[in-house]
Image (cartoon, coloured by chain):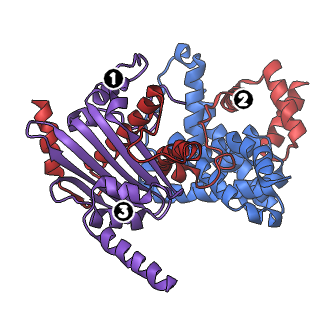
Chain colours: A red, B blue, C purple
Amino acid sequence: MSRTDLITLIDKYLNAETSLEEEYTLKREMMRSDVPEEYHYLKEVFSYFDAEKQHTEIPDFDNPANSASGQARVISFSWIYAAASVVILIGLFVFINKNTNTFDEDTFQSPDIAAENAAQALEYFSYQMKKGTDPTLKNVKELDNLNKYIAIFNQ
Amino acid sequence: MNYNQIFNEEVFPLRDKLYRFSQSIVRKNDIAEDVVQEVLIKVWDKREDWKDWNNMNAMIFTITKNLSLDKLKSKNNQLRPIPEGYDTPSETRGPAQKAIAGDIHQIIKQSIEKLNDIQRMVIQLRDMEGYTYKEISKMTDLTMAQVKVNLHRGRLELRELLQKQL
Amino acid sequence: MRNIILSTFLILLFITGAKSQSVNDFITKYKDDPSFTVVNISPKMFSLISGLEAEDMDPDLKAALQNITGMKILTKESDGTKYFSEAISSIELNKMEELMSVKEENSNVRIFGKNNGKDALSEVILLTGDKESFVLMQITGAISLQQLSKLSGTLTPPGSN
């Protein structure tokens, strides 16, 4: 492209009269031809646009279509129920298999399974106990009693 | 096609463009991030209205534009004006410093930020994202003539700002 | 005639139900109702548990388990508030110290404990109830709340899937 043609094209560009194809040609020509001093800035501007487009760091956006609505809210409650339902499932299994169990009889025959369930129960207990120290909850009573027992073992 | 598929194929992939677009208006990365996340959620929540949108792409950009401008208004005090001389390279910089590409890009970036909102927006959509005048007109609620006028003025102003510096 | 017997029986049941019960009585009352889940882990089982080589178990959890001699749990996955109220009013809790009570809009948590005369608790009872679930848990042994408070409080026990 001749120098005159290039300058004509630049003028057209500045007047916002170029088509997308012409702008593409202009950008390409600017990279390869000898650009008049006064338009060096434009070369840099084009290279800036290219660089920005390619190198903008795009944050990780949540895709609302993939996180089924309300899921987040459900999760915050679900672990209580999850625990309860695991216990219930195991319990149901035991109930179906052992209709005759009287209450003093052990629910689990295997110490491993019993240990897992006991551990889970303790974790649940701990979780509930921590509610007592949660500053965001109102209506927490009798915390002193709880702290007294915790403090005893701190000593 | 269900909503999920449409969203995943037509809306979510736009997030890069929307982010850069919002950035061009609000000029702050974290605010642009908030805007785009909000737009994505908003568009998803309105999925039942999609069938009434003539041009989904344009509609999403319009929502992004409006939300960005809202943020700009509500955060007006923090966002502008960029104080004169703030972080701008002094005129006395030598050629060696100019040669650093990052530095030049910084100067260009600051000059673009000095344009008014509309000029910045149309330059962003045209020169960076490569949309047609017609598409830009739909996205920004401007007439085609207004798009061109603003593009023209913005480009002239950039020349004004940069010719001296580079 | 049959109705009278039935109603007398129901009234009797109501009266006895309204009287103070032990946790054991309360659980026994519901143990055959399939909507409830009952778990009992006996002292004998806990002695077996303490002999387990559970290497992958969290040490804090392991330590807590060592001091426990019995555990009874009754849970139901609905009508939590109703059974919570029933348990609070019918289970004999006078001799116990209330350690904690959290009352939120739709959920209640209460913890009671019995001092063993030394520094630990010989028994703790946890009651929780909300719209969706009811939990009654009784733990006996030499229970250290300090030890329990060290647990992560997550609900997936180590070593289980």
Work out whether residue A35 or residue B82 is closer to the camera in this orientation and state it: B82
The residue tagged with tag 3: helix, strand or loop?
helix
Q: Residue at the front extreme?
A: C1
Identify the subunit bearing mark 1: C
Drawn side of residue A27 relative to residue C12, left or right: right
Same chain for the residues under marks 2 and 1 in the image: no
Say which amino acid is labelled 1: Ser
Picture quadrant of residue C55: top left
Tell me: residue B93, above or below residue A66. above
Q: Residue shown at 45%/48% (left/top)?
A: C38
Residue pointed to by mark 2: A50
Picture quadrant of residue C70: top left
Kindly check if marks 1 and 3 are in contact, taking CB atoms under 8 A apart as contact. no
Same chain for the residues under marks 3 and 2 in the image: no
- The answer to whether residue C105 is visible is yes
Q: Which label sits on residue C50?
A: 1
Same chain for the residues under marks 1 and 3 in the image: yes
Tell me: residue B10, above or below residue A42. below
The CA span between labels 3 and 2 is 65 Å
Q: Where is residue A110 in the image (x, y as percent from the top left)?
A: 48, 28
